[in-house]
Amino acid sequence: MQWNLRMAAAERGIWKSTELRRLFAEAGLEISAGKMSALWTGTPTTIRLDDLDVICAVLDCEPTKLLIREPDKVAARRSAKTATGEEPQAAPGPAVQPRLGRNRTKPPA
């Protein structure tokens, strides 16, 4: 997914993150300066749906305006998976053994 907050804000004549942060606060969404900077300059790894709802209300847009699908990236991941014929595997590590003690049972098989 591509995060398109700056473009959606620019279409509404909002050019500074501080101005957008003030509008969010007026709508009831208090965002720290650090979080606002992350939303403004990059792609957030997570975003609460309540926050997304306020962002869309302030910018008068739909979530599809902020979150843009990238089907080429999905296709590239799929082709990389089928090229090897296998799922990518995690690095091998030590096997985890459960510690059995008093009042503990064995994990299900």
Image (cartoon, rainbow, N blue to C red):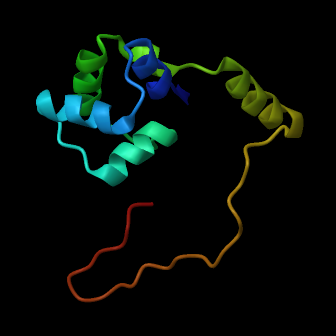
Residue closest to the eye, 75 or 5: 5
Left or right? Give the position of 35 relative to 28.
right
Left or right? Give the position of 99 relative to 1.
left
Residue 19, horizontal then vertical, whole percent: 29, 32
Q: Is residue 48 visible?
A: no
Residue 49, horizontal then vertical, whole percent: 27, 30
How many numbered badges does the structure rendering display? Answer: 0
In the rendered image, the vertical position of residue 80 relative to residue 99, given as above or below: above
Q: Which quadrant would residue 99 be assigned to in this image?
A: bottom left
Left or right? Give the position of 37 relative to 58.
right
Q: In the rendered view of the protein, which quadrant contains the C terminus?
A: bottom left
In the rendered image, the vertical position of residue 101 relative to residue 13, given as above or below: below
Q: In the rendered view of the protein, which quadrant contains the N terminus?
A: top right
Please tell me which residue is depicted at 57% across the width and 19% down the height of the picture: 69
Please tell me which residue is depicted at 73% across the width and 43% down the height of the picture: 87
Q: Is residue 68 visible?
A: yes
Please tell me which residue is depicted at 68% across the width and 59% down the height of the picture: 90
Residue closest to the eye, 9 or 71: 9
Residue 32, horizontal then vertical, whole percent: 26, 50
Residue closest to the eye, 85 or 75: 75
Give the residue at the far right of this rendering: 83
Left or right? Give the position of 24 relative to 1.
left
Please tell me which residue is depicted at 56% across the width and 27% down the height of the picture: 2
Q: Which quadrant would residue 57 be assigned to in this image?
A: top left
